[in-house]
Amino acid sequence: MANYLIKGATIVNEGKCFTSDLRIEGGIIAEIAQGLDPREHEETIDAKGLHLIPGLIDDQVHFREPGLTHKAEIKTESRAAVAGGITSFMEMPNTIPNTLTQDLLEEKYQRAAEVSAANYSFFMGASNDNIDQVLRTDPKKVCGVKVFMGSSTGNMLVDDTKTLEGIFKESPTIIATHCEDEETIRKNTMEYQTKFGDDIPFKAHPLIRSAEACYKSSSKAIELATKHNARLHVLHISTEREVQLFSASKKLEEKNITAEACIHHLWFTDADYDRKQSFIKWNPAVKTALDRIGVRQGVISGHIDVIATDHAPHTLDEKKNKYLKAPAGGPLVQHSLPALLDLYHQGVFTLEMIVQKACHNVAKLFDVSNRGFIRKGYAADIVLFNLNAPWEVSRENIMYKCGWSPFEGHEFKSSVVYTFVNGEKVYANGEVDEEIRGERLRFDR
């Protein structure tokens, strides 16, 4: 394992922005101070003009392995993740087979140990009939339990009232929910099929998977969590109305109910459907400009605690289908930090806010051990980026296995230069070191 001295970086960490050197020894942050002298057997990196932050921790990705590897693989998508400044990810259970047993869950961990360029954890999946398996989840080794309270890719819908009560009452760890009311969605779908047949326009997506469907389901999840004193994390908030369901008055460490925003809901609006079509079809749907403002303000106010991607790739051929057959989801991990930095350039978020919501708070919310901060003794999961190094997204520089991005043709203002995972330089100037592997995340619970 190489040792590094990073000289003259602008460090953004724990609400402060300052210039310092940083030393990495044995995969750990060993020193943070100005004027550090190079040592023998240490590689020096001149970081003048670069910003240094903790690696992003993405609490919601779909890497499609096993069973859907024509869309993506842990190997390919973790490579794209480190290229985008993400050093740790938490992956969802709607693979094939669904991750509904402890044995299937452990198989994912074993595969990630073999191929993942980033650190990793995997959610245990819940269904209408596997609560015995859910209760065996080890909270120190597994990020959480995922409950689909609205059907999405993989159709792991949990709609049995008794099962939901049992999960919220007895889950040994944090419950992460996809919240969309299925009855509302089915009713809206039938209405649009009656009106348009097979030619439903993509701009109808936020009307079919409506703000009402989101609010109704999120409210139900919060009601269940409150009733059973469960630790609940509601994923991908997409509406202004939902934001107000969450508290901004408590510190994150004191919250029992938390929320996440995703890049696409912070970036796109329903005005983009005519141009982007299925490429911005997500569940929950991208909604109005007012909803986007509401979600952005929710991040700033503290109603929404973390930012993630919901990276969920499909092939181009799959996405080229008409509305009812085109699957929901898109690839995002390679472009999440550049997109957030564009929002910084636009004056939406400060750099300190980006680091808080995409790094610090994810570590706090999930009790991730020894990561998420620039602190002496912490794992050296760090990212160096150039705020003023524009680049255009094209098929030639996309690293996702699916080969496309909703950002194609967009010129980002900032570039990731280096990504370190456990002190190893896994990404440097456009190249991924194929030999480096991440580690399984541990949780201080």
Image (tube, grey):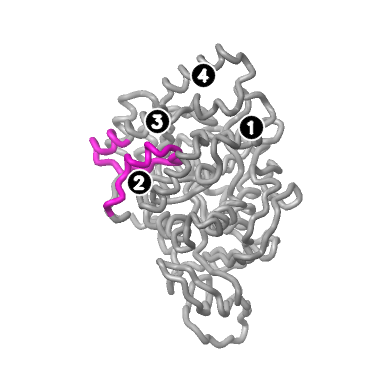
Determine the residue positioned at 36% across, 52% down.
301
Determine the residue positioned at 50% across, 79% down.
20
Q: Residues within 10 Å of mark 2 (few under 14, many from 20)?
A: many
Say if 182 sits above or below 420 in the image. above
Say if 86 sits above or below 261 in the image. below
Determine the residue positioned at 40% across, 56% down.
361
Q: Is residue 107 visible?
A: no
Q: Please, what is the three-letter code of the amino acid marked with disc 1?
A: Asp
Residue 7 image offset from top left, x and y in percent: 57, 79
Labels 1 & 3 near each other (Cβ < 8 A): no
State the residue in front, 97 or 195.
Answer: 195
Q: CA distance from mark 2 to mark 3?
A: 25 Å
- Disc number lying in front (4 or 1): 1
Label 3: which residue? 130
Which residues fall within the magenta stretch?
222-250
Query: Of callouts 1 and 3, which one flags the residue occurring earlier in the amino acid sequence?
Result: 3
Q: CA distance from mark 4 to mark 2?
A: 30 Å
Label 2: which residue? 258
State the residue in front, 131 or 160.
Answer: 160
Labels 3 & 4 near each other (Cβ < 8 A): no
Q: Please, what is the three-letter code of the amino acid marked with disc 4?
A: Thr
State the residue in front, 260 or 241.
Answer: 241
Most extreme residue toward the top is 194
Residue 103 image offset from top left, x and y in percent: 48, 40
- Disc number lying in front (2 or 3): 2
Query: Of callouts 3 and 4, which one flags the residue occurring earlier in the amino acid sequence?
Result: 3
144 left or right of 9 in image? left
- Disc number lying in front (3 or 4): 4
